[in-house]
Image (cartoon, rainbow, N blue to C red):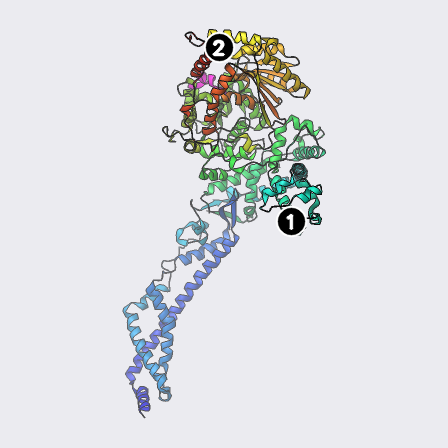
Amino acid sequence: MVRQAVGYRLRVGLNKTEREELRRLVADFRRWGHLAETAQNWHRAVQHAASSAEGTMRARSVVVDRSGRAAWRVLALRESDRDVVQRLRERALLPATTTADRALLRLLTDDAPRAVADVAPMLGVRRYFTGPAKMQSAVTASELLRRRHAEVIGAGGPERLAHLGVHTAPLDPAPASIDDLLDPALRFALLAERTGPEPELVDRSVFGGLPAALATIDKVVAGEASYRSAAREAGEKVRHAEVQRILRDMPVDALRTVTRDRFRLGPLAEAGINTVQDVLRVGASLQALPGVGETSARRMIGAARALWQTTYDDSPVRIDIDHRSPDTTHLLRCLAEWDAHRRTHGAAADLERAAELAPLGSTIDRKTSHLLVVPTRGLAATGLRESIQIVKRRAELLGGSSAAGRRSVRLDPWDDFLTRPADYLAMLSELGFATDDENAVHGDLPDEIIQAVRDQALDGEHLTASLRGYQSFAARFALVQRKVIIGDEMGLGKTVEAIAVLAHLHSRGSTHFLVVCPAAVVTNWVREIIGKSTLRPHRVHGPERDVAARTWLRHGGVAVTTYETLAWWEPVLREFPDLACVVVDEAHYIKNPQAQRTARTKELVARAERAILLTGTPLENRVDELRNLASYVRPDLTVDATDLSPKRFRRQIAPAYLRRNQDDVLAELPELIEVEEWLPMSAADTTAYREAVKRGNFMQMRQVAMLQAAQSTKMQRLVEIVREAAENERRVIVFSHFRAVLDRVAGALPGPLFGPLTGSVPANHRQQMVDEFSAARHGAVLVAQIVAGGVGLNIQSASVVVICEPQLKPTTEAQAIARAHRMGQVQSVQVHRLLSEEGVDQRITELLAGKRRIFDDFARVSDMADSSPEAVDLSEAELVREVLAAERQRLFEHPPELPAPSR
C-alpha cells in the first residue's frame, strides 16, 4: 500500500506549471545538444581533413641523405596543394576549446541527453502507467536538468556554443598560397620533424631539370657499368688469389687465435694438413680423420673461415710489378678499358650527390612548383640547393662529353700502368679495393668537425683528377674550416687536395687564387694545375712575371709565385681585394715569425677569404714552430704554452690541423726498406777527418768520408749500391747536403748520370732534369743536393735512395725519401744511409733521435707517452758544439781551447 501511494504522488506530483517549466528545460537541452553536436562534428571534420591531407603529404615526401645519414625531408609541391593549405588554414581558425568547453560539450552530448530521456515519463499521460522505479529516475533526472540548466546559463554556455560553432576570424579572402605552409599558425605536421635551421621553400628555378640531370648521369654510369663490373670482378679475383697465398703460408696453429677451443692439431699434421688453406681445401672431410670428429671439424672450419674473412678484409689489391701474374695483367687491362670508356673521371663526389638525390628526383614532375625542405639533422636547405646545382652541372659536363678523348687500350697494360700508376691506384680505390683506416682518414679531429666535413659537398666540375677518399676529406676539411694546415705525410697528394679546393671555389664563382711556394716547385705546381683541373695557372716568377701578374689580375686563375717574388709583388697584392684562397706550399718555410717572408705571407693569409698551409714537416725542431703555423690560420685558437702534453696540444690545434700518415691511408704503397750502412773509415778518411776536427771545421767533418774518391769506404759502397740497382732494373737518387760531395759522386759513378741538381739550377730546369732522369734506362743516377732535390719534386721513377751523410734535421731526410716513396710508386723503395762507424755521423744520429720523438709526439698523430720538448731539443749551434767537443775529447787527450765553429 505504501509503495502504491508513493508511486501515485510521483505520477501526479507535478502541476501543470512545473511540467511546462520542465518541458522548456528539455527543449533548451535538446537545442543546445544539437548545437554542441554540430560544433563537435564540424571540428572533427576540419581536423580530420587537415590530418588526412598531412598524412598524404608526408607519404609523398622523401628523405634525402648526406654522407649516409638522413639530412632533409623534402616534399615536392604542386599548385593543387593549395587545397591542403586551405584545409590547414581552416583548422588553424577553429575556435580553441578550453577545459570548461570540453566539459560543456560532454554534458550536452552525453549526460544531458540521458537525463532528458529519463524525464520523458513525467511529461506525458504515460506517467500514470509508469512504475515507481522509472518515476524515481525521472524525478532525479529532472532535478539534474534544473541544476545543470542553471549552471549552463550562469557560465555563459549558450554564448560559448555560438563561439565554438564559427571560425575565430573570417577566412582570408585571398586564395591559399603554397608559401603559407611555412606559417607556424598552420601547424603543418611535417615541420615538426625539423632540427636546427628553419624549413625553406625552394622554387623551380633551383631544382628544375634535376630529373633530366639524374637521367643523364644514370645513362652515362650505366654505359660504364659493364666495364666497371668487369674491373671489379678482375680485382676480386686478384684479391682472392692474394688471400689464398697468405693462408697457404699461415700455419694451422693460427686457428687457435680466433677461438677459445683447444684443438688437437696432431691429427691434421699426420694427414699433411699444415696450413689454414689446407683446412679450407679439405673442408668437411676433416671429420673423417682419426681423432678429429664432427664437432671439432666444424669448429676448425669455422675458425679457418673467420681467418679467411679477416685476411680478405685487411688485404688491398696490390699491383706487384715484380710478379706479373695473368690475373693481375687481366685486372690492368680491365681497368684500362674502364678508364677508356668512362666519362666520369674526377666525378666520384658528384656521383655520390646524384645517388643521394635520386629519391627526390623521382618525385619531381612538370607540375612541381616548389620543394619544401625540412632539415632533420641540423643542415640548412642551402646544402640541398648546393647538391642540386652540383648534379646539374655534372650532367651538363657528361652530356657534352664524347668518345673523342678516349685513351687507346691497345697499349700493353703494364706499360700504361708504369706510365701513370696513380691513375690506376685511384681507380682501385674507387672500386673499394683500398683498405684505408677510416678513422685515420680523419686524423685527430673532433667528432663535430668530422661530421661537418662529411656533410660538406665537394664540387668536381673543374677537377679532372680522381680523388682518393682521404684526399676528398682533406679538401672538404679545408672548405669547412676555411683556414687550415694540411700536414699530411709527404707523398700523399697534398697538392691535388689544394687544387680540389680551388676547383670547388671556382665553381662557386671565385676567380682569383694564389699559390706561394719555393722556386723549385713552381713548375710542378703549374703542371699539376693544368693536369688535374680546368683552372688556368699563371707563373708569376722569372722573367715573364710582370705579364703573368697583369694577366692574373685581369682574368683570374691561379697565380703561382715564390716567397722571394712576394717582396716584389706585395704592394699590388696588398691592394687586391678579391683573393679567394691562398695556398702556402712547404709552409715550414714560414715557421719563423721574425722572417720577412713570414711577415709577407702571414699578411696574405690574414687578408684572404681562405687559406691552406701545406707541409709534411710542420715541426722540425720545436713545438713552437707548429704553434706558430696554427696561429697564422687561426689566431683565435688558444694553445697553452705552459702545458706541453702532446695529447692536449693536438686537441687544441685540431680545428686547424689535419695530418694523415702513409701507413694509415695508402695500404697499397710498396714497402719502404731503410738500411743504416755503418762503414769503417779508410786510412785516408781517418786522416782527413782528424785534420778537420783539429781545425774545428764541423762541415768539413761531415763530408770528408766522401771526398777521398776511390779511397773512401762510403764511395766504394755507393758504387756497389748503384751497380746492384742497375742489375735489379732500378734507378737511384743520391742525396747530399754538400756540393763538393755531389761533384765527387758525379765523377765516380758509371752509367747514365743526371745532375748535380742544386740550388743554383733554375727552378724550371729542375723538373726538366727529373723528366730526363725518369726517361733514362735502369741504373740511371740522379745526384741532388738534399735541400733542393728533396723538396716538392716527384721522382717515383727512382726506387733506391742513398743519403751520403746524416742531416741535422730528421725532417730533411724524410722529405728526401718522400720524393720517391709516395703515391704512385710501384716498387719497394730502398733507402741506404751511409754512416761512418766513428765520428760525427754517430754523434749526430744519437743527438737527433730526440728530435724524431718530438715530431712523433706533437705533429704526427700518435698515442705515445707525454714528453717535454725542452728536455731533448737542440739548436743547430748547440749540436755543433756538442759534437765538436765530443770528438775532440775522443781523438785528443787534452783538447785545446775550441775556436768558434766554422759554418
Q: Secondary structure at mark 2?
A: helix
Q: Nearer the viewer, residue 155 or 755?
A: 755
The magenta segment: 560-571
Q: Residues within 10 Å of mark 1 (few under 14, many from 20)?
A: some
In this rendering, the answer to whether 469 lies above or below 594 is below
> Where 201 falls versus 420 (above or below)?
below
Q: Position of residue 844 (x, y in %)?
A: 49, 17
Identify residue for label 1: 296
Q: Nearer the viewer, residue 264 or 164?
A: 264
SS for dot 1: helix
Q: Are marks 1 and 2 in contact (CB under 8 Å)?
A: no
Asked if residue 856 lies left or right of residue 781, the reply is left
Instruction: Name above or below for residue 565 compared with residue 243.
Output: above
* Residue type of the residue flagged with mark 1: Ser
x and y, in percent, of residue 642 in the image = 36, 28
- Which residue position holds label 2? 891
Which residue is at a point 41% across and 30% down the rendered structure image? 634
Q: Is residue 691 above or below residue 193?
A: above
Q: Earlier in the sequence, mark 1 or mark 2?
A: 1
Labelled disc at residue 626: none
Q: Amino acid at mark 2?
A: Leu
Query: In which quadrant will I find the N terminus?
Result: bottom left
Instruction: Give 403 or 864, whichever is nearer the viewer.
Output: 864
Residue 218 visible? The answer is no
Q: Residue at x 43, y 13 (%)?
A: 881
Residue 520 visible (yes or no): yes
- Residue 279 is a magenta residue: no
Asked which quadrant contains residue 436, the reply is top right
